[in-house]
Amino acid sequence: MRAVAGAVGMRAAAVLLGAGCLIWAALPAVHRGYATFVLAVTIAAVAAGGLRLALATVPVPDETYWPSPGVRAWRAFLDVMRQVPWEEGAVIGIAWLEVLHPSRPWHTAVLGAGLIAYLLVVHLAESDARLATLRPQARVLGLGAVVLALGAGAGMLPAAGPGAGSALLRLVAAGALIAAAGLVLPYVARDV
Amino acid sequence: MIPNGPGSPAAGTELELRWRSSRHARRLLTLGLTGLFIAILARRPEFAGLAAPALLLLAAGRARRRPPRITVRAKPTTRRVFEGERLAVDVAADDADEGSVRWRLHPGPEVAPVGATAADGRQARFVVTPERWGRRQIGTLEVTLRDRWRLAEGHATMTLPGLDCYPAPAAQRTTVVLRRLPNRLGEHPARTSGEGIEFSGVREYVPGDRQRSINWAASTRRGRLQVNTFAAERSQDVVLLLDSTSDVGQPGSSALDLALRGAGAAARAYLEARDRVGVITYQWGGASWLAPALGRRQVYRIIDSMLASDAGYSRGASFARLPRAALPPGALVVVFSPLLDQRFVEALRDMRERGFSMLVVDVLNTEPPARRRTEDRLARRLWRMEQDAIRFSLRELGVPVVHWDGEEPLDLPLAAHTRRPMAARR
């Protein structure tokens, strides 16, 4: 009973996190860059991802020589639900909705944290794993959070001068930050 | 469940692992690449930060060691079961110190899982039940070894051992006994007197008779010593003749299913009565046989022989060429057949003319579908008349034909022939 409640809770958390990230990235509404279309597709992707998790334990009907149209349709539906990468679509859509807004680095950093949490919870829900499974990754996730915050900080730095070169410089700084994080990674990722 | 002898540890099978990124890793990669792509295109460093946790997780997970192979031990609790019985398959993975193991069972044809078909952990147990008799494959086992960070998955597939599923025997307690029995010690009272326990009459005492067999009451009445006589106890040879040329009806209750279940029940009943029982399986292209023998093991030998008929077409001997050992003279032949194959019916007539005492258990429980068209109705009627004619001709030859629906115990249709010894008419 406890396991079932845990599994249901994890699936619900995944859907809520996906919906939260979507709302966070979509508001305030913008009307350019196919925003409405991308929003609709992303809503569908988040909902379908949730449905996929809900249907994960539903068995596929047995193979028969002449399955009824209903059985065939149900099997095709389950196939589509399980094969299509809904979460990847949702992530791309959410990032696209975020980039349509003017630069808001702290907002993007929160979205980044939300997205990584969404993907981790989806993973836990689909593999019926407990939260403790992520314990060995805690240090790396912590390092990632630091880099995320530093990236947002880099985005908030005022431009050194007008023109594209200044923005590029900030980007290079962020890239260097990720590279530096990669260098310390072997020491951080050592097993507990 | 049929015992399989003392359990022994299963031998390990080394399986090559095919490693690939997990779905989780692909999602993280999507997030990382999307973030970096947008950061470069839009020149917004905060998106590089958004990509960082996912990329760092992937980089850290990539550095981990992945075993190239895994040793899997799979052992079913038994290799022989009856239809509908359950058996468990215990699986265990060695060399999986790091990471988690996920098992997924893909049951073979006519094998149904009982409970979950997926499990986590280094050891797992799957319970399955074969739905229909035959030599079956339990199925295949898919092993997925995930690294500790669950970013990569190693996949391997293993074919589970085969399984002999025996037909669930029907209920039969009574046996048909021939009037004329061979001169061999057994449990059926014969018409001749001997050392049995069934009283057969009284006769005058002759020197050498046992004193304990003197019937004092009769001796007092007649004035001379009288002794009790008893029926001799004999055994008979029983040959089960199985027609596996026609398998009609719904799977699970088809003619061949009923024939096998009935033959299994008859083999048990006659072997329990200390008769020698053999089997002849008639199939396309010939017949396979097992000579009559005694003992409990013979039940399994008979069923194994019948299961071999599941293999389909096989070339063997015809009835005329069957050796004396397979069809001993004076044997009772119990036939399980839907009587659809004309050549089989001819073979039965031939055997009857050669003097064998026979009893046919008709296991046909299906008919051509009822349709509205006149031609179809006419064809159905002709078919019925033909079937009636076949059964009538066998009865005319002195071969009793009883119908069995597979639901009731076999004792009911055989009741008319089990009450008294069956005469071997010539």
Image (tube, grey):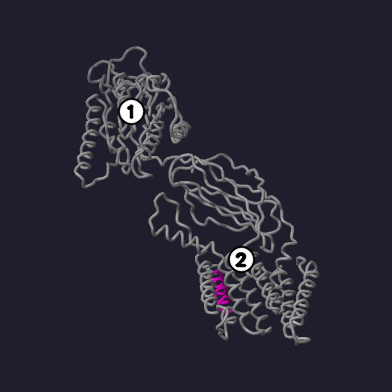
Depicted B340 relative to depicted A127: above or below:
above
For numbered disc 1, what is the local secondary structure? helix
Q: Is residue B156 left or right of residue B320?
A: right
- Compared with residue B378, is residue B229 higher up or lower down, i.e. above or below? above
Question: Which of the labelled discs sits on residue A17, or is there none?
Answer: none
Q: Position of residue B338 (x, y in %)?
A: 31, 35
**In the picture, residue B409 is in which quadrant?**
top left
Asked if the magenta segment contains residue B313, the reply would be no
Q: Residue at x 73, y 65 (%)?
A: B59
Q: Mark 1 against mark 2, which lies toward the viewer? A: 1
Residue at the image point whose x is 53% and y is 55% from the top = B117
Tag 1 residue: B344
Q: Which residues are magenta?
A: A5-20
Residue nearer the viewer, A79 or B121: A79
Q: Which mark is residue A129?
A: 2
Q: Chain of mark 2?
A: A
What type of secondary structure mainly makes up the magenta span? helix
- x then y, percent, for residue B113: 49, 52
Tell me the crowding category of disc 2: few under 14, some 14 to 19, or many 20 or more residues within 10 angstroms, Cα based.
some
The x and y percentages for residue B313 are: 43, 32
Task: Spot the residue most to the top.
Answer: B207
Horizontal side, residue A73 vs residue B65: left or right = left
For the residue marked with disc 2, what is the amino acid?
Ala
Query: For the C terminus of chain B, which image quadrant?
Result: top left
Type of amino acid at the residue the image marks with label 1: Phe
The outermost residue toward the front is: A163
